[in-house]
Image (tube, grey):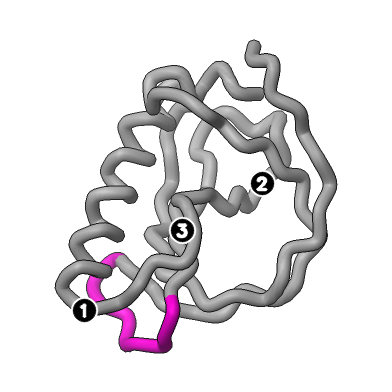
Amino acid sequence: MSDDTVELLTTPSMLVASYKMTIPTNDSVPVYFERAHHALRYFISTNGVKVLSPFFSIWHQSPDVVENEVVEGVFEIDKPISSADAVQVYKVPETLVASLVHKGEFEELGLAQ
């Protein structure tokens, strides 16, 4: 368990590059996030897009789901471009979210709950 605090915030609408995945078990989240991070960085660098935010995730299920979790690894980007392969580009609407900012190694990410 971490000392990080969960906050409710309203995020503004933003244009994102997203790598969506299904993570088989919760303990493999760091491996999948690293894969998403590398795929997004490659996509961004080869398309001349500027990153406007740190890497973050969009979870599509409740926190009690710990198997076959559907999640997106995301970077906010500066301009619309075409999606390619596993990376989708789309606009996220303004949304109320539960936010937890993890500050640490990928290997420690599973402890941030």
Q: Pick whichever of labels 2 and 1 is earlier in the sequence.
A: 1
The three-letter code of the residue at mark 2 reads: Gln
The three-letter code of the residue at mark 1 reads: Asn
Q: Are marks 2 and 1 in contact (CB under 8 Å)?
A: no
Residue 81 place in picture, x, y as percent: 34, 87
Q: Pick whichever of labels 1 and 3 is earlier in the sequence.
A: 1
The three-letter code of the residue at mark 3 reads: Val
Residue 104 place in picture, x, y as percent: 46, 24
Reply above or below: 71 against 83.
Answer: above
Q: Pick whichever of labels 2 and 3 is earlier in the sequence.
A: 2
Q: Residue at x 27, y 44 (%)?
A: 35
Mark 2 vs mark 1: in front: 1
Q: Residue at x 44, y 52 (%)?
A: 73
Q: Kindly identify which residue carries mark 3.
A: 74
Mark 1 vs mark 3: in front: 1
Name the foreground residue: 104 vs 113. 104
Q: Magenta residues?
A: 78-86
Residue 10 place in picture, x, y as percent: 81, 61
Reply above or below: 74 against 4.
Answer: below
Image mark for residue 61: 2
Q: Is residue 97 left or right of residue 91?
A: right
Q: Residue at x 44, y 21 (%)?
A: 27
Find the distance from the CA under tag 2 to the CA under tag 1.
Answer: 31 Å
Residue 3 place in picture, x, y as percent: 69, 16
Image mark for residue 47: 1
Q: Secondary structure at mark 3?
A: strand
